[in-house]
Amino acid sequence: MSTALIILAAGKGTRMESDLPKVLHRIAHAPMLWHAMRAGLAVEPEATVVVAGHEAEQVKASALDFDPEAKVVIQQEQLGTGHAVAQAKDALQGFEGNAIVLYGDTPFISEKTLLAMLEARKSHDVVVLGFEAADPGRYGRLVTSGDTLDRIVEFKDASDEERDITLCNSGVVCADTATLFDLIDAVDNNNASGEYYLTDTVAIARARGLSATVVTCDESETLGVNSRAELSEAERLFQISRREELMADGVSLQAPDTVFLAWDTVIGRDSEIEPNVVFGPGVTIENAVRIRAFSHFEGAHVSSKSTVGPYARLRPGAELSEGVHIGNFVEVKNAVLHEGVKANHLTYLGDAEIGARTNIGAGTVTCNYDGVFKHKTTVGTDAFIGSDTMLVAPVTLGDGAMTASGSTITDDVPAGALAVSRAPQVVKPGLATKLFKMLKAKKAKQAKGN
């Protein structure tokens, strides 16, 4: 059966103390909204509807960045979760299948949990995601009779007996789309908050003779983010979980707590990550790569059997083929380094293509920017770039070419040629001795005067 996602993302998030909509605050370099949308991909949704409200245009732009096919609808007034879901009705007109309601500020619902909810939907009309709370606090309570969910009671409306229940409501609901909207149409706001609760649909469903049940998950999956402190805690939990996944998949982390990952970081088995490494978004590390300490990555791809760092920086567009060596204080941006390239010290390679097995000497810089335009440097295979070479782009060096140390290369260098571009050395015999004598005498005179 087809499935649609309804993702609620209309809240302002007053406790965040921010001009940014709550769901656009980032965990592991991605908006919380993206985490929720990615979780929903597990059910292969045929349609995704995001319900926006506060700063709706920003939320819409972010949702469409993740999924250009998503539909974004507006909740003009925030009158409760039931009212929010109702805003998706027109967008799903004619859709036949299940609908799952998710939340843009609850980013950690797992694939396993969503699939379990769909499985439960095969035998029940309404499925609610619940969890056993260590501290039930002000969560809504799930009132059950065996496997049957009778109703959901909001904390404000719960009796003392109902507040003793520890099975709590996550807010995530799955039902047939037509049934869901039919139930919502029957919801009123006769409660302590004067809001239209999505949770009331369960009692209405049971009163109509429909079946309802609960699927449970670990409490950590239901973590909602409403403040900066909770955002920080969500980041911490994400990093712990992702590090554990990587190590279980065969990646070595020497000091796991010091490695920070993005939401989409991919690292292959038998790779080794030394301490204090940071991964920004869009990074793929293949198998058997060694990432040395204090390196930073963003938008980069590193092929197998390569070594990067320590203190290296790979920026967007960095493409390293197999067996490449990038050493300390080397920066690579928008550059392709073919198999076996070595750039081991103090080098900048930007807007460049470096041929296989070429050696880049210490202090080499591709001078790629003229103040207005970026230009490309191309170096062939098996070339040798001497230390402290300035490659002033656009420039091309052929296969097996060589540059002398300290050269500034402004013209193309043919294959097999040596390019030397530096001022002739002048030697003045005895002049150093005279200069030292003069300077030391001047220093002594100043010291005596003081």
Image (spheres, rainbow, N blue to C red):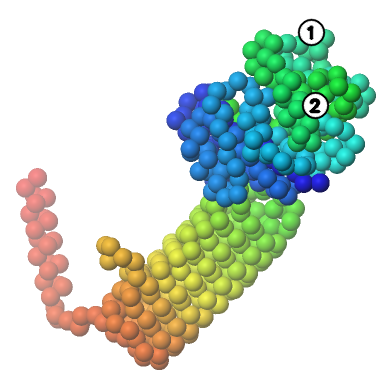
Q: Amino acid at mark 2?
A: Glu
Residue closest to the eye, 196 or 148:
196
In this rendered view, identify the residue nearer to me: 423 or 315: 315
| Residue density around tag 1, few if under 14, some if 14–19, many if 20 or more, within 10 Å | few
* Residue 221: mark in rendering: none
Image coords of residue 195 (percent x, y) = 64, 16
Image quarter hosting the C terminus: top left
- Residue 181 vs 122, above or below: the answer is above
On residue 160, which mark appears? 1
Residue at image coords 36%, 89%: 414
Residue at the top extreme?
A: 160
Vertical placement of residue 74 versus 423, above or below: above
Depth order, front residue of 147/190: 190
Residue at 74%, 20% (x, y): give it: 186
Q: Which residue is mark 2?
A: 132
Residue 373 seen anywhere in this rendered image of the structure:
yes
Say whether residue 377 is left or right of residue 97: left
Find residue 395 and report its image quarter.
bottom left
User: Which badge, 1 or 2, is on the more N-terminal residue?
Assistant: 2
Q: Please, what secondary structure does the residue beneath circle 2 have? A: strand
Residue 15: image x %, image y %?
53, 23
Q: Nearer the viewer, residue 308 or 158?
A: 158
- Disc 2 residue crowd, few under 14, some 14–19, many 20+, Cα 10 Å: some
Question: Whole-Å distance between the Cαs marked 1 and 2?
Answer: 18 Å
> Height in image: 259 above or below 120?
below
Q: Amino acid at mark 1?
A: Asp
Residue 33 shows in the view: no
Residue 228, position in %: x, y? Answer: 53, 29
**Is disc 1 placed on a helix, strand or loop?**
helix
Image position, residue 421 (x, y; %)? 26, 82
Q: Is residue 232 left or right of residue 367?
A: right
